[in-house]
Amino acid sequence: MAFSEDADRTGLVLLLFLGASTVVLALPRADPFLALHTKQIGIVEMSATRKPTSTAEVVQQLAKELENLQEKKDTPYIWPVRWERDRGMYPSDVKINFAGRPELAEFRDVLGVFDNNMFATAWITICLLEAYHYAKAPRPTDDQLGLALKAIDEYHDKNTVYENSVMNFWPQKYNQSTGTWQSTPRNMLRAFGFFDVVPAKLVEDFLKMIGLGDVAKIFQSILSMRSTFQRAFHIPPDFDDTFVNMGLGSLLADLGDDMPDALALWREQNSNVTSALDALRQYAYRPFSSDQNVNTIDVRTYYYMRHFLNKARARGEDIALVPTWVQNLDEARKNYYKGVAMPFQMNNVDVTVAANTVYGLTASVLSGVLPASTLDDPLIRQVYVNTSSMIAHQVTNQLYGRPDLELTYYPSVFEFYWFVARTYSRMETALQTMPLPDAMQEVFPILKSALEKNMTKDIMEKAKAEGQDMLYFDDFLGDGDVDKHNQTLVRGEDRLFTTSVAINALLSTWTVFSDVNKTIYWKTNTPTDVRNTVDKSVRWLTSNILEDTYKPFNVFFSGSTKGKSSQPFGFPSNRIEYLNGTVIDNDRRFPEGGPFFFGVQGTIPEDQYKVLITEKHFGMTTPTNFTSFNEPGNYFPFWASPAYTYANAMLALARFDSIVG
């Protein structure tokens, strides 16, 4: 894969990701590298035989390709030609969202590090199970499920000294010097380690020599933060992976008669599921509590969350919400030096993590994975209801125009919508045969209103026409580039994924699965324009998902900082401390006495807060506006998985094709 014609550098590819695995010069436009690159990132290549044309045929083909994309064996790392790949994983790559000039776009395309993580494999497996359970997709094989579950089993938290279902994003490695298990993205660490072999100055000079000065500056910036990045890799377990795993187990429980071996394996691996509830009780964000361990939150979270919190305080309500990290401040103080700490040593609330946790709780109770009495526990019920209400509040208010803050780790609002709609859909399925538990009865109408009104309106307004009978959806990947004449390009690199999750969000909201007769049907109150939008979007997706017109990329995950607008340092805080507990009086400048944390404890009166956002913090202005994830000069790491795109497309197409009437 050589530089595009617009780049005026045909025949040259520099493989460099943070400091990727090798440098390839004078590479012909040709095919050995293209084939290798395509295989590594998991892009489906259709053979010369007849391509599927009907929706059902496309679903069948996608199911076959997904089975082929799963890693069947452990593959060792070989410098500089091959990343380590763990058996059972579905492929996902860490890439960087460079946007702008042609060479930056090319770097975004070809550079990537294969990442072994629980998340991509869990979500792809969930899509496979849902497509089979709720629709007419092929049944994933027992081998396929067994490989995935055995791979995911490695991600249970090893610092918890008893059997648990608290999960990590990355595999852990024991550090004998600190006596702790550390999250260890091995390939990412190797990418930085490239510069222990090849001098960074050599690469920088080469980039400048071939006219890639902008890339050289980015490269220098990344390398200057090498130790920061490496420390950020050593994160604690999180509620996202924890409750995604619970949701996966719930699907297997729903399918227990059909998949007894997979369910038995999951239950064996998760013999203490209530450990997830114990963690939720201990680490829930409680802004009105006097406990300083749980009443302080990331300044970016508070910026968008304050509207919800202020309304709750005015009503005299206590609040408990799902945070991202399974860690509190005292543990962060202690474990920072052991290599297990939250980014910025501070917890946050991501509305998408919150949505996944609500789904995990909902599905676990309804499937019997968790006891029916789970939501009778006062604190668990409070977290469940408060978090669901908060999610509905954010949907209703269109994320207050700050997706960069609210979608802390998931930049795609369409993906967020689908995650929320999954909970609502699961409740509707249960209602076909039984009444909902009291807490769910309280949550159900709140989610229903937000999804049927606000979410649906937002999705419908974002649909784009292709001809008279097709619609698609774009997010942002590849839509911030320019050609050599500085003309704006819209590449639609996440178009396939975004269209898939938009369809899934609408179908999860406006169709009902009957567990009695195993059919899907439109709700009687479904607006005609919703049905037409889904129909035209399915037609577009069927026509394009197996073609090479659009890249099957996505931004299904990212770091919390995605540019200047989401850097935490410019936001107001009211609590700043060194990790040893010494209070720092103000935020006029960066502290020089060692590691520190800063956040908002409790709440700040709104009139005071409005004054604070006009002032500088750590020398920075509060970023009060969000423009784009493709803002010039911004770049950030993200996770892309074509396999996840294919899995979402298969689910969307299979569910649509199964609608009766």
Image: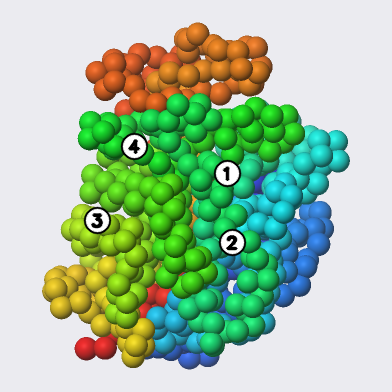
| Mark 2 secondary-structure assignment | loop
Q: Is residue 465 visible?
A: yes
Q: Earlier in the sequence, mark 1 or mark 3?
A: 1
Residue under the image location 38 percent in, 47 percent down? 382
Q: Which residue is mark 1?
A: 326
Q: Which residue is mark 4?
A: 318
Q: Is residue 123 visible?
A: no
Q: Relative to 79, is 327 above or below? A: above
Amino acid under label 2?
Val
Numbered disc in front, either 4 or 3: 4
Residue under the image location 48 percent in, 91 percent down? 50
Amino acid under label 3?
Ile
Amino acid under label 1?
Val
Q: Nearer the viewer, residue 429 or 213?
A: 429
Disc ID at residue 273: 2
Q: Which residue is mark 3?
A: 446
Indicate the position of residue 531 as horizontal and vertical percent values: 20, 75
Q: Are marks 2 and 3 in contact (CB under 8 Å)?
A: no
CA separation in Å, label 2 and label 3: 28 Å
| Mark 4 secondary-structure assignment | loop
Q: Nearer the viewer, residue 276 or 511?
A: 276
Indicate the position of residue 326 as horizontal and vertical percent values: 57, 44
